[in-house]
Image (cartoon, rainbow, N blue to C red):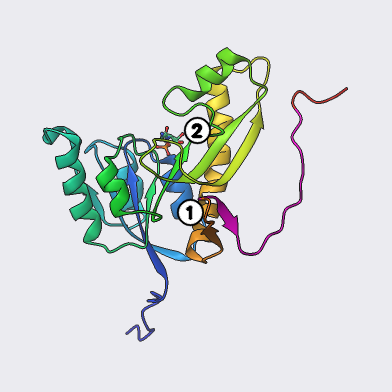
Amino acid sequence: MNLKPESVDITMKSIVILISGLGSNLRALLEADMPCRVAAVISNRVDAPGLEIAKQHGITTRVVAHHSHPDRESFDSELALCIDDYRPDLIVLAGFMRILTPQFVARYQNKLINIHPSLLPAYSGLNTHARALRDGVKIHGCTVHFVTSDVDHGPIIIQAAVSVLMDDTPVTLAARVLHQEHRIFPQAIRWFCNDDIYLSAEGKVLMKRLEQPGCALVSPEMG
Ligand code: GAR
């Protein structure tokens, strides 16, 4: 008989992760060492491959299908009811491809974070890698931020930058950015769950324990 006490730490924060697709960020989060409990993974698509990843990790999965709702308000209401079943401290959008209503965002104010594949505020919206390549930018990247009703413009928690290479295509650039997404997303959640970050009166994310090396990424490299 196993008499070991339950290993769930009840003081730990709990999170709910929302996905729409492949779930590579979800996988990175589930494989990372994070000081929180993943209470559930919710998808707006029944065929999202990420649901299988969650199941493999023994995480409860739920589907709230957007196409069975007549409008955003009714979808968001059902989504909120589903989320609230788990009373999470944080809701994590990990490739969740739905625009959320202001009412939904207000309900989870300062408890909702998103990852976006660009260095915000540049390239909000879709097709970020192709647009960056078209503009000829030399540095591109990804951002984790708090969600506000201004889509892709909430307070920034962490960003990672990559060099744009001369022979990059949207696919090769996306792969390098995605690799960085998988690094910074768990870090942002770790900071949140350990209460290491807070929002200033001006609405900026600040760190409680500040250690900034002040390094620079120059691209292309200087001769
Ligand atoms: C990621 O690149 C994420 O940044 C992006 O969708 C992809 C999901 O991939 N999110 C957005 O564009 C949100 N605006 P994943 O399902 O493999 O994690």
Majority secondary structure of magenta residues: loop
The answer to whether residue 170 is visible is no
Identify the magenta region: 203-218
- Image position, residue 25 (x, y; %): 45, 43
Q: Which image quarter holds the C terminus?
A: top right
In the image: residue 37, left or right of residue 135: left
Q: Which mark is residue 31?
A: 1
Element carrying mark 2: loop
In the image: residue 26, left or right of residue 157: left
Q: Quadrant of ligand 1?
A: top left
Mark 2 CB within 8 Å of ligand 1: yes
Name the N-terminal-most of marks 1 and 2: 1
- Image position, residue 176 (x, y; %): 59, 31
Examine the rendered structure and indicate whether residue 117 appears above or below residue 192: above
Q: Quadrant of residue 139?
A: top right
Q: Residues within 10 Å of mark 1 (few under 14, many from 20)?
A: few
Q: Mark 1 and 2 residues: CB-CB less than 8 Å, in contact?
A: no
Badge 1 amino acid: Glu
- Image position, residue 205 (x, y; %): 55, 52
